[in-house]
Amino acid sequence: MKKYLTTAFLVIFSFVMVSCNCTKNSFNTEKATSQEIMTNLNNTSWSLKRLDVDNRDFVPTDEQKELTLSFQDINYSSSDGCNGQGGEFEIEDNKISFTKGMSTMRYCGDEMKHLIYSVPFGSVKSMEIKKDQLQLLDSDKKVIATYTRKK
């Protein structure tokens, strides 16, 4: 009997630990402070999954396996498939704003049009993080772009 109770306790304890771990992975940006959002974003990289504003999924190619959005302290960097850009971002009252800093200016002709996924960072007004997914939203709360967290 003692063996069964011990086994039952271990199974229940395992379920509790798994459910606690799942709760830790669900970060709610609507309930978080601006500082908590900054801390959660710091040193993270995200892969573009969908450019929602253009109703277009990201399709990897041999030359372009992923497009990333990275956050480091108050800086961000990104690529559209042809040019890279970066700058500073700020979160205040749970609203995010991107300030364009540096950008490459490579010529991207019509032959590259299908490879370019230009995220309009200037239109981004807020964001949501749900588990391993980051969504950038405009002022009407419409999704501009969806990213998944890189492991």
Image (spheres, rainbow, N blue to C red):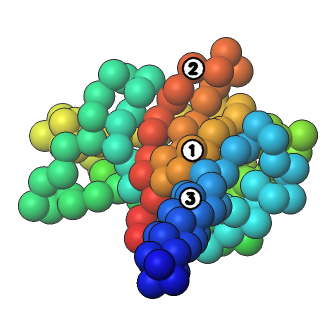
Q: Which residue appears at 38% of the width and 48% of the height?
A: 48
Sequence order check, earlier mark of 1 and 3: 3
Residue 149 appearing in the image: yes
Q: Which residue appears at 53% of the width and 26% of the height?
A: 143
Circle 3 packing at 10 Å, graded few (<14), some (14-19), many (20+), is few
Q: How many marks?
A: 3
- Numbered circle sitting on residue 19: 3
Q: Which residue is mark 2?
A: 142
Q: Mark 2 and mark 3 in contact (Cβ < 8 Å)? A: no
Q: Is residue 131 above or below residue 141?
A: below
Taking 88 as reference, is 82 left or right? left
Q: Which residue is mark 1?
A: 130
* Three-letter residue code for mark 1: Lys
Residue 105 appearing in the image: no
Taking 45 as reference, is 30 left or right? right
**Place of residue 78 in the rendered image (x, y in percent of width and height, measured from the top left):** 48, 57
In front of the other: 131 or 81 = 131
Distance, label 1 to label 3, CA atoms, is 16 Å
**Place of residue 63 in the rendered image (x, y in percent of width and height, measured from the top left):** 14, 62
Please, what secondary structure does the residue beneath circle 3 have? helix
